[in-house]
Amino acid sequence: MPRKIILDVDTGSDDACAIMLAYLHPDIDLQAVCTVKGNQPIQYTTENTLRIRELLNADFPVYKGCSGSLVKNVVYPRIPPTANADAYDEQGNKIHIHQELFDLPESKGDIEELNAPNFYVDYLSKTREKITIVAVGPLTNLAVALIMKPEIAENIEEIVIMGGGWNITNATLAAEFNIYDDPEAAQRVLHCGAKITMVPLDATHSAYISREDAQDLRKINTPASLFAADLIDVRILVHDYAQPLEVPHTCALHDPLCIAYLIDPEVLQDVKLCNVEVSLSGLTEGQTCVDQRAIQENRNVNFAFKGDHERFSKILLEAFRG
Ligand code: RIB
Ligand code: CA
């Protein structure tokens, strides 16, 4: 039976690959996509999501979400994380890991009337079967919905979050971007009572995707596989320049790893149920503090310390081969 999911995205390059993997793989039933600000402002993340929907000739509903965080940036200008998402190509042109708008035709389709938090409250109040939420951007939409109606957590099968880090960070010296962008939202979601699996940078960096994987996607030669290969090639350039992984000419493709976990749980390794709290201020703002003591309280998160790159690339390619 395909796993029913709602995908919450801040569509940038890896979010786009997560949407395509979720839509193309037969083991996933993509019920809806919610957009949130993050990699880009909400207008762009929503437009990019619609462009991917049209690239796939898909018809899943898209619900536009929050344009700002719960607390951050309300009282002071946005403090941009360290720019470690930029690189320079051979001609010296600056390239960013997430384009503002994808090089795809302008979208023709519409978003839904309901905004994302209200969609969550409506859907999760009415559903007769539990559903899995895969959140691969800042957690603002889900946090707002949980503030409006905490009991909706009872109808959530599992929340799979791309976010956090144990030994690896990217936004600051202490934090990963999705959590850093809205730490208060993350802290609320981590304590909502639903089963939570967190896929941090430690997992996404070890489950790297290679240049050869991008070449294999090109050989499939569909509009979706070619676009995914282009996105991966740019990500590899940026990683080689700004965040080199253990294997040269590879990239972390964070968001689709959360989808791959639902298809093959073994794609995540060294998963431990432990207490995870989010630092909300100071130098460590946005840090995921992971308790690894033998004796601890409130084990609220299944935290994946590692990923399997062979299993991950196999799942990705089988989906795009259709
Ligand atoms: O830190 C990586 C995460 O932040 C990914 O989800 C990426 O898309 C950005 O949202
Ligand atoms: Ca994302």
Image (cartoon, rainbow, N blue to C red):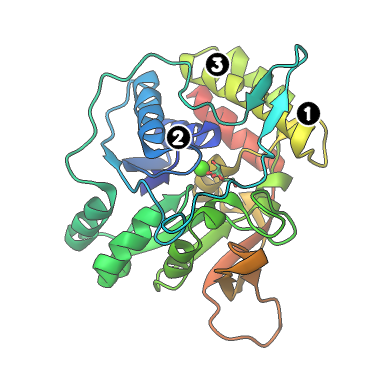
Separation (CA) of disc 3 from disc 1: 18 Å
Label 2 CB-ligand 2 distance < 8 A: no
In the structure shown, which secondary structural element does the residue marked by tag 3 occupy? helix
Of 281 and 11, nearer the camera is 281
- Could you tell me which residue is drawn at 63 percent across and 49 percent down? 267
Relative image position of residue 160 (x, y in whole percent): 48, 56
Q: Is residue 117 left or right of residue 256?
A: left
- Of labels 3 and 1, earlier in sequence is 3
The residue at which mark 1 appears reads as 249
Q: Are marks 2 and 3 in contact (CB under 8 Å)?
A: no
Callout 1 amino acid: His
Q: Nearer the viewer, mark 2 or mark 3?
A: 3
Callout 2 amino acid: His
Q: Is the residue 254 above or below the residue 240 in the image?
A: below
Relative image position of residue 175 (x, y in whole percent): 64, 57
In the structure shown, which secondary structural element does the residue marked by tag 1 occupy? loop
Q: Are marks 3 and 1 in contact (CB under 8 Å)?
A: no
The residue at which mark 3 appears reads as 226
- Of labels 2 and 1, earlier in sequence is 2
Pointer 1 local density, CA inside 10 Å: few below 14, some 14–19, many at least 20: many
